[in-house]
Amino acid sequence: MTVAPITVRAVLELLLAADSYPHVGNHDSIKAAYLEVNALSLAKTPVESSDDPPDFKQWLTALLTPNLPASQHDEVYWSMHDFFDPDERR
């Protein structure tokens, strides 16, 4: 089975969707973790676009780093939220 290529932007948007998944109950944490793992599995071979800012590759590289410190993980997600949702303040 052939999987269609996915763009770096699309992977980052999937990661943001996982990070933004509402946590109402314990099962929601499991679902959010699944969404993040699924998005990261797609991030192994994303297609870069000529209009992607350099931050995109840096964020993806960081999130694919094993044992990334929690502070750096959070910093990447905050940067992504600021880029994709500049009016959304958490």
Image (spheres, rainbow, N blue to C red):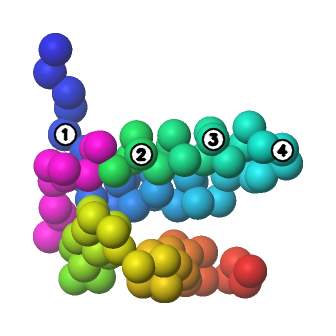
SS for dot 1: loop
Q: Which mark is residue 30?
A: 3
Q: Is residue 33 above or below residue 61?
A: above
Number of callouts in the render? 4
Residue at horizontal 16%, vertical 61%? Answer: 48
Which residue was labeled with disc 4? 25
Residue at horizontal 33%, vertical 69%? Answer: 67
Question: On the rendered structure, is 15 left or right of 20?
Answer: left
Of the pair 4 and 25, the residue shown nearer to us: 25
Residue 17 visible within the image: yes
Does label 3 or label 1 sit earlier along the sequence? 1
Of the pair 83 and 90, the residue shown nearer to us: 90
Does label 2 or label 4 sit earlier along the sequence? 4
How busy is the neighbourhood of tag 1: few (under 14 within 10 Å), some, or many (20 plus)?
few
How busy is the neighbourhood of tag 4: few (under 14 within 10 Å), some, or many (20 plus)?
few
Which residue was labeled with disc 1? 5
Report the amino acid beneath label 2: Val
Magenta span: 41-50
Magenta residues, dominant SS class: loop
How busy is the neighbourhood of tag 3: few (under 14 within 10 Å), some, or many (20 plus)?
few
Task: Tell me the mark number nearer the camera, choosing from 2 and 1.
Answer: 2
Task: Tell me the mark number nearer the camera, choosing from 3 and 1.
Answer: 3
How busy is the neighbourhood of tag 2: few (under 14 within 10 Å), some, or many (20 plus)?
some
Report the amino acid beneath label 4: Gly
| Label 2–label 4 contact, CB within 8 A | no
Find the distance from the CA under tag 2 to the CA under tag 1.
18 Å
| Label 3–label 4 contact, CB within 8 A | no
Find the distance from the CA under tag 2 to the CA under tag 3.
11 Å
Find the distance from the CA under tag 4 to the CA under tag 1.
34 Å
Which residue was labeled with disc 2? 37
x, y (%) of residue 34?
51, 40
x, y (%) of residue 88?
70, 78
